[in-house]
Amino acid sequence: MPTPIAVDHLVAGVLEDVAAREAQVSFQEVKARSRDMEPPRDAFAALMRNGCSVVTELKRAVPYAGEITQLSSPDSVAQLAQSLEAAGVHMMACQTDRRRFHGSLEDMRAARAAIEIPMMSRDIIVDPYQIHEARCYGADAIPLQVELLEQVRLEALLDRIESLGMTAILEVRNCAEVDRVIKAGGSVVAVNAWSLTSDAIDRFAFSEIVPGLPESMLRIAIGGVNVPRNVLSYASHGADAVLVGEAVMTAKDPVALARSLVAAGQHPACPSRKRS
């Protein structure tokens, strides 16, 4: 098993990259640009459907396996995004983390311009600069890794995301983090079965954590979705949506797999917490 990555090392790398970009485009400039953008698409509404919605994640690599697919340019990312949208997925996510996932903001901008559904920027967000920057590149939703953020910073970043009209998705990995999400006033929680600092996966995390969530909170399951029955299983435990990345990106036919996941989530037999 690969050596786990220290949390402080992850955050330090993010801040180093942010500082380099801010040296090129100031915080004041990126903030002004972000507020001049067209309004974001409604990510919350895209996930509030009967059945279980499907979010597909575009990415070139994963931290412990390296490159997992051949996407040579932002244009190729955009073409795949279009195909996945045609398969019926409800929201798109794009990895913009360069160091671990070989992603870029340019990938996200190209993909978002090619589709009509909302786009989530997938990255480690620890600084306000990143939020305004992501909005400039078309992000409609932003994730926050609760375990990386002190409560004051978590609440400040959540408020900033919402002030730009975007949807904040708070990612948790244990029940203590759920308590912090509730205190912060989050309305969308994603239970991530993957460890942030290793390649370990806890397939029971969702079923263990969800009972502690308020009924009003929208729930997304991340990790362990490979086939349609995984969608049905998560839905039976209360998932409103699932996010699937590696399985789709490594599939022989990514569009066919995405279509089958969507069909399972929208099948009349799929459990649903939602109302028409």
Image (cartoon, rainbow, N blue to C red):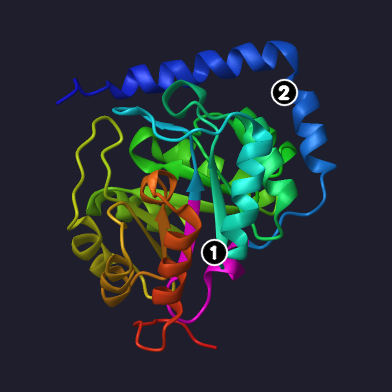
Regarding mark 2 in the picture, which secondary structure is present there? helix
Q: Nearer the viewer, residue 67 or 122?
A: 67
Regarding mark 1 in the picture, which secondary structure is present there? loop
Q: In the orientation shown, which residue stands out farthest toward the left?
A: 1
The residue tagged 2 is 27
Residue 182 position by quadrant:
bottom left
Query: As displayed, is residue 11 above or below residue 160?
Result: above
Residue 20 position by quadrant:
top right
Q: Is residue 84 left or right of residue 251?
A: right
Q: Which residues are magenta?
A: 43-56
Query: As displayed, is residue 183 above or below residue 238?
Result: above
Q: Amino acid at mark 2?
A: Phe
The residue tagged 1 is 89
Residue 101 position by quadrant:
top left
Q: CA distance from mark 1 to mark 2?
A: 34 Å
Q: Position of residue 130 (x, y in %)?
A: 61, 31
Q: Quadrant of the N terminus?
A: top left
Q: Is residue 111 left or right of residue 196?
A: right
Residue at horizontal 63 percent and vertical 30 percent from the top: 73
Q: Position of residue 11 (x, y in %)?
A: 41, 22
Residue at horizontal 24 percent and vertical 69 percent from the top: 211
Q: Nearer the viewer, residue 150 or 108?
A: 108
Q: Amino acid at mark 1?
A: Val
Residue at horizontal 48 percent and vertical 82 percent from the top: 50
Q: Give the number of callouts.
A: 2
